[in-house]
Image: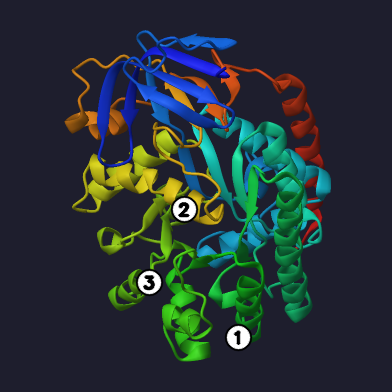
């Protein structure tokens, strides 16, 4: 017997080739889709039957780069100095916040970020974590929040020397390895986890060669990919040229840190030659339009040349409908050549990244038999015909997180009729607010 049967719904595939199938059924058994299409539910019995009449079903969205530790920063009330450039913003705001985090606040950051993502139609998150005052065990706290909410998640610790030099580097590398081995142990016991690991690094300008060598060893030891900010601002590229006499990409390549399971982030100041090298090595690059605009770091001129572009938020929440709209309109404003279909394909490519991070344990991103049942039901009523040829245009110009009615992840109906089915939202967010006030008080006492 199936676990969930969705009847008479319009299936819209968001990964190319785009398609629209009306009056379709979807049968979910365990964590995967068993059958999908017209007549797929004929003769099927299930304890949970969802009437999809007038609704649209899409694969869940993926946020390819997030900072869950930003979850308690919204409206943060601290005394901060000038923030007139990128480095000042890091020092006066983000680096004070991350130093104020403890185990409890990390957990609630993860839990509420996961819940907000689920409510907004995001079923997969690739997180990048930092908490210099609480390194060992921090990734387990992030993973617990993800798993308690039920989202598919990947996390890592951003290795850096910015606070305590090489001692901090070693602790960061050790935490990445420890968590990866924790996941391996859990897989050995149960065969499946909702979370996975990567090997994280902050940015090349806070990573000496010894740190890159240690990260490279960790990548080989754990079999995971690297997750690293690169050239978010020209400062990073200038630092690489000044201190190391080479481009960022060439420097990373010397340490064998560019590969098909590598996730690089931002790339605003990368040269065309560096983009070519990144493409040759098969690395992903996450574009974060809102964050780039907020930090005033400029616009990436070679966006359309990146072969494995994915879309992230860099901590600006988990709403990928909103992120994609802003990315599209910023591209148009900058005279870019991309259209809605290009951006929707980049967003859906986040599922390829998820497959890479989960190392083949499941297929993501399509509503087809054998794929993970990570699905979103929308109440969007198209004012014009919805066809395969204009599905991306409807996604960018019309659909939004306000249309999310229900969210299914790994075959579990976690959010139904705009309500969480397993979590006490009011209690959790009250606890998060209490934890946030403690974080703010600690951050306010920390000097930039």
Q: Nearer the viewer, residue 89 or 209?
A: 209
**Dots 3, 1 in contact, CB < 8 A:** no
Q: Is residue 156 left or right of residue 25?
A: right
Q: Secondary structure at mark 2?
A: helix
Q: Which mark is residue 278?
A: 3
Q: Nearer the viewer, mark 3 or mark 2?
A: 2
Residue pointed to by mark 2? 353
Q: Which mark is residue 444?
A: none
Residue at 53% x, 89% y: name it.
Answer: 243
The correct choice, above or below, for 401 with respect to 183 in the image is above
**N-term mark: 3 or 1:** 1
Neighbourhood count class around disc 3 (C-alpha, 10 Å): few under 14, some 14–19, many 20 upward:
many
Residue at 43% x, 50% y: name it.
Answer: 352
User: x, y (%) of residue 418?
Assistant: 55, 16
Residue pointed to by mark 1? 209
Residue at 24% x, 53% y: name it.
Answer: 334
Dividing the image into 4 quarters, which one contains the N terminus? top right
Q: Is residue 276 left or right of residue 421?
A: left
Viewer can see residue 131: no
């Amino acid at each position: 017997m199936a676990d969930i049967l969705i009847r008479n719904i319009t299936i819209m595939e968001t990964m190319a080739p785009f398609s629209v199938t009306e009056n379709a059924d979807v049968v979910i058994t365990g964590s995967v889709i068993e059958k999908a299409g017209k007549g797929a539910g004929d003769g099927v019995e299930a304890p949970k039957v969802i009437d999809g009449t007038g609704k649209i079903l899409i694969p869940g969205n993926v946020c390819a780069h997030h900072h869950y530790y930003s979850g308690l920063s919204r409206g943060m009330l601290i005394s901060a100095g000038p923030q007139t450039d990128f480095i000042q913003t890091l020092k006066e705001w983000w680096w004070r916040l991350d130093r104020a985090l403890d185990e409890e606040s990390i957990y609630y950051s993860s839990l509420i970020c996961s819940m907000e993502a689920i409510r907004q139609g995001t079923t997969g998150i690739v997180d990048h974590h930092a908490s210099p005052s609480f390194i060992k065990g921090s990734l387990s706290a992030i993973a617990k929040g993800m798993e308690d909410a039920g989202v598919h998640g990947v996390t890592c610790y951003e290795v850096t020397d910015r606070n305590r030099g090489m001692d901090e580097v070693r602790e960061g590398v050790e935490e990445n390895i420890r968590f990866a081995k924790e996941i391996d142990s859990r897989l050995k016991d149960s065969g499946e986890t909702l979370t996975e690991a990567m090997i994280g690094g902050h940015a090349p300008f806070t990573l000496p060669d010894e740190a890159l060598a240690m990260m490279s060893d960790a990548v080989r030891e754990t079999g995971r990919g690297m997750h690293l900010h690169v050239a978010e601002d020209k400062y990073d590229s200038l630092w690489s040229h000044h201190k190391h006499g080479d481009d960022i990409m060439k420097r990373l390549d010397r340490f064998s840190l560019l590969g098909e399971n590598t996730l690089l982030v931002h790339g605003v100041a990368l040269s065309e030659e560096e983009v070519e090298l990144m493409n040759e090595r098969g690395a992903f690059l996450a574009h974060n339009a809102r964050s780039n605009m907020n930090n005033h770091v400029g616009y990436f001129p070679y966006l359309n040349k990146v072969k494995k572009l994915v879309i992230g938020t860099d901590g600006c929440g988990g709403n990928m409908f909103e992120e994609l709209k802003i990315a599209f309109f910023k591209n148009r404003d900058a005279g870019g050549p991309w259209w809605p279909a290009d951006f929707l394909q980049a967003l859906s490519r986040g599922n390829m990244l998820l497959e890479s991070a989960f190392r083949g344990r499941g297929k993501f991103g399509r509503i087809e038999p054998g794929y993970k049942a990570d699905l979103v039901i929308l109440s969007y009523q198209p004012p014009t015909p919805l066809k395969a040829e204009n599905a991306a245009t409807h996604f960018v110009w019309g659909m939004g997180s306000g249309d999310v009615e229900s969210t299914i992840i790994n075959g579990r109906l976690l959010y139904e009729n705009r309500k969480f089915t397993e979590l006490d939202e009011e209690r959790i967010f009250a606890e998060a607010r209490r934890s946030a006030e403690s974080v703010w008080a600690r951050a306010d006492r920390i000097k930039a």
